[in-house]
Amino acid sequence: MLIGYSIDHIALSTYWIFFGIWLNDNIIQGNENLTYPYLILAIILATPAIVSIIGTSVFSSISDKIGRRKEIMFISRVLLMAQYIILIFFGNSTLNVLLILGTFGLFTQMFYTMHSALLTSICHPDKRGQVSSFQVLFASFGWMIGSGVSSLIYNSFDIAGSLVFAAGFALLAGVIVMFSPAKSWNHKELKQKSVDLDDFTIESEEQAISELKEKDSTQITKDITKLRTAEEIAPEKKKAASYWQIFKRRDVLSLLITLAIVDFGFGPFNVVGNVFLKRVGLSDGYISAGNVIATFLGMILLLFIGKALDKRGRRPIFIISIITYPILYGLMYLLTSFPNAIFVLYLYPLYALKVPTSNAIMSDLTSENERARGMSLIQFEQIIFANVGAFLACFIADIVPQELFIIPLFPFSFGIVAVIVAFLIMKETDKKILLKRKIKSEPIS
């Protein structure tokens, strides 16, 4: 699963880093009839994600019902390969690019939801934080490799060469995930319909906690694992919740609200960030190197984040991940006249904290037979709010004298709001941490 994810990100980074720059320089800026070029650029780049809401919601529901993940991922990568090939021959106008990305976007983005759902199902609940971290770690490794060669491929073969490489790696990613495990971590217990849980059940949690208080720390840890096993197996017998039912859960809603504020601010930089870097004076080589170094630093950070998530809990790591947004982009706005400073700031891997923490939280809040829908809610939130933020910021950039230099103000201002909201509404979701706090009579936050 992880190797396939890494190869998928090689495919993505091989072309995506310079796709926006190529599109802006060769098609959009050459069309004098476009009144709002940056807004048009943002709309085109956001189109695959926006239309993916339809495809991902449908296939996530189907996947949860039939229990198939990797087959859907394989189909998604085959179609992604087809998208890249068609872009080579027909991506010669704004309308064509928009139609191609819009059509295939219905199917290509669901790969990530399926991957997160399956990955957090085949591992033990106590390892979800580490596994979510590993997922981003392998994605970073793939992105680092693709970033390292993207500038060379683009400058040697133009965007067509980038798309050829991307198509090959996309297909390879789909083939590799087909060899991954598909059964959940507890399939043996479920198949046997019998497991020694020492009378730990969902209904007897309070009694179990009372008994655990009298035991030493080592035995407490073992018994909490058994109690969590009971909790994980029990939902298998229940009917999976709908999108709306999952969305209404307090902790799910708190997570989505906080992420929505962050992503609304970050969206502009996420969509046209490379164009911004080009405008402040960074060359193609610097942009490529920046992606390589940033992902390498992210990989180092991810080696420690997973264990921290499972040992210290989700809430403190999540809040730290949010705080970095206003700090980083506030400095970036102040230093737009200094390209080297922008390059250094760009190297901080924001995703290394936010992505695995968010996925771990959502996996805590959903059972296995509804996890694809839970994960897709994070994807839908990101798509909607990040792109609405991008459209607004790019529209402003089209009509104000500072143009793209307005972009860093969005993640700075909305990042401040998100930090305040996270402190007020985000709660700990790791049941192991919560049970330990109950046993020790500590307040749960």
Image: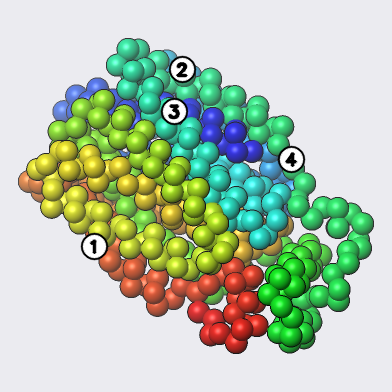
- Amino acid beneath label 1: Ser
C-alpha distance separating marks 4 and 1: 43 Å
Quadrant where the N terminus lies? top right
Label 3 or label 2, whichever lies nearer to me, is 3
Image height check: is 64 above or below 144? Answer: below
Residue highlighted by disc 2: 164
Residue name at image x 28 percent, y 66 percent = 416
Q: Is residue 141 left or right of residue 278?
A: right
Residue highlighted by disc 4: 181
Residue highlighted by disc 1: 413
Residue 211 location (% of width, % of height): 77, 84
Q: How many marks?
A: 4
Residue name at image x 59 percent, y 68 percent = 430
- Amino acid beneath label 3: Ile
Name which of mark 2 and mark 4 comes first in the sequence.
2
- Amino acid beneath label 4: Pro
Name which of mark 3 and mark 1 comes first in the sequence.
3
| Circle 3 SS class | helix
Q: Inspect this view and state whether residue 116 appears.
A: yes
Residue highlighted by disc 3: 145
Between 202 and 141, the one lying in front of the other is 141
The outermost residue toward the left is 401
C-alpha distance separating marks 2 and 4: 29 Å
Residue 105 location (% of width, % of height): 49, 37
| Circle 4 SS class | loop
Residue 326 picture quarter: bottom left
